[in-house]
Image: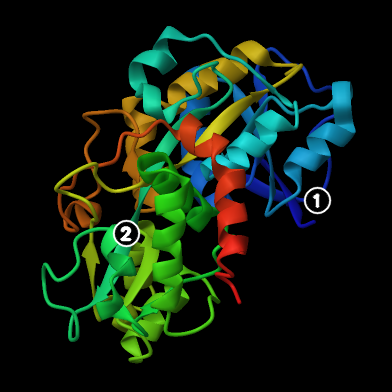
Amino acid sequence: MDIRKIICGTVLGASAITANAASAQEVNVYSLRQPFLVEPLFEKFTEETGVKVNVIFAEKGLVERIKQEGANSPADLLLTVDIGRIQDAVEAGVTAPVDSDVLEANIPANLRDADGHWFGLTQRGRVIYASKDRVSEGEITSYEELADPKWKGRICTRSGTQVYNVALFASMIAHHGPEEAKTWLEGLKANLARKPQGNDRGQVKAIKEGECDLSLGNTYYFGKMMDDEEQRTWAEAVNIVFPNQGDRGTHMNISGVTLIQGAPNRDNAVKLMEFLSDDVAQKIYAEVNYEYPVKPGVEWAENVKSWGEFKADDLPLNEIATLRTDAVRMVDEVGYNE
C-alpha cells in the first residue's frame, strides 16, 4: 500500500502519523483523496484556526488499516470518494456519528447520512458523453434511452462492478424497481460496442477514435481531459449530456468525510469537518477537481459553469448505499462484464 504522510501540506514519506495522537492543536486525517486536492484546504484551516492537520494518504486500504489499529488508531477523520466506499467504512464499524448544526445547515439531507456517520463534501454528476459528430443534440436525453436498440454497438462503458457504475445502477433500482432496472441493464449491455474495460476517460478516447458514440462518465473527468494536452482532443470530440432533465435529474455521487470512532482529537476533527462544509473550503475543494460544492449557493468554478446548469437527482444517497449489493448482483445476472 502506497502511504505518504503530509504535515501542513508537505509530503514527508511513509510513516505513522504520531505516537502521541491526541494534541490540543492537531487533527489526524486518513485520506484516499490525492494530496493536491486536500493540501490547499488544510493549509487554509491551519491559517484560520492554528490547528495543525496531519495527513496520511493512500490509494486504498485505509479502512482496513484503521480496523487493524483498533483503539490505538491515531485517525480522527477519513476522507474518501463514492457513496459505496463511504458506506464500506460505516459497515466496517470504524465510524462515529456527528451531531452538528453547522453540518446540517450546510449540507442537504440527501447528501449526508441520516444518522450522522458521513457527510458529502463535493458532488460529481454521472453523465452521458456523446460524440459531437455522430450524435445529434437532443438525440439522447435520459439514462433509460441507453437501452434503446437504436444504440446497438454504439456504447462504451467501464466495468459494471466499478463503484461509480454500481451507484448509478443502484439509483435505477431505486427509481424503477429491480425488475425494470434489470431489463434496462440487459438493454444497455446489448448496446455495448465492446466488453466493458478501462476508465471513464478511456471511454471518451474510444468515442474520439470512432469505436463508440456514447459513454458514461463523471463530470470532473471532462475538466481533467481539457487540462491534458494529449487528452484534450478526446474531450473536444464529445458533448456532455446531463440526463433526465425532464424528470428526476442527473444521478450524483460525492466525495465525503467520516469521523473515526475513538478519534483522539474529536473536537478538532468536528471543527475541520465544519470548515470543509463552509463557503471558503467548499469553493476551493470543488474547484481543484472540477466538482460541484454540496453547500447550496457556493459559486461553481468558471470552467464547470461552462458545462451548463442542470437539475440534479435528489435521491438520498443512503438509499443508493443500501441497494449496492442488489446492483452488483444484477450486473452478474445479466453478464454485463462478459
**How far across and how far down the image is residue 177, in percent?**
42, 43
Q: Quadrant of the image for the N terminus?
A: bottom right
In the image, is residue 21 above or below residue 88? above
Mark 1 secondary-structure assignment: loop
Q: Position of residue 90 (x, y in %)?
A: 66, 29
Q: Quadrant of residue 322?
A: top right
Residue count near mark 2 (Cα–Cα under 10 Å), binned few <14, some 14–19, many ≥20? many
Q: Left of 235 or right of it: where is 205?
A: right
Picture quadrant of residue 137 = bottom left
Q: Which quadrant of the view contains residue 102?
A: top left
Residue projecting furthest to the bottom: 210
Marks 1 & 2, CB-CB < 8 Å contact: no
Please state which amino acid type lies under the numbered disc 2. Answer: Val
* Picture layout, residue 253 above or below residue 67: below
Q: Position of residue 232 (x, y in %)?
A: 32, 78
Is 327 on the left-hand or right-hand side of 244? right
Q: Mark 2 sits on what residue? A: 127
- Residue 176 percent coordinates (x, y): 36, 45
Residue at image mark 1: 14
The total number of labels drawn is 2
Quadrant the C terminus occupies: bottom right
Does the image show residue 297? Answer: yes
Work out how far the residue at label 1 is from the one at label 2, CA to CA, in angstroms: 37 Å
82 on left or right of 259: left
Q: Earlier in the sequence, mark 1 or mark 2?
A: 1
- Which residue is painted at 45% across and 41% down in the image? 254
Q: Nearer the viewer, residue 284 or 127?
A: 127
Q: Is residue 195 above or below residue 260?
A: below
Q: Regarding mark 2 in the picture, which secondary structure is present there?
A: strand
- Give the residue type at disc 1: Ala
| Mark 1 or mark 2, whichever is nearer to me | 2
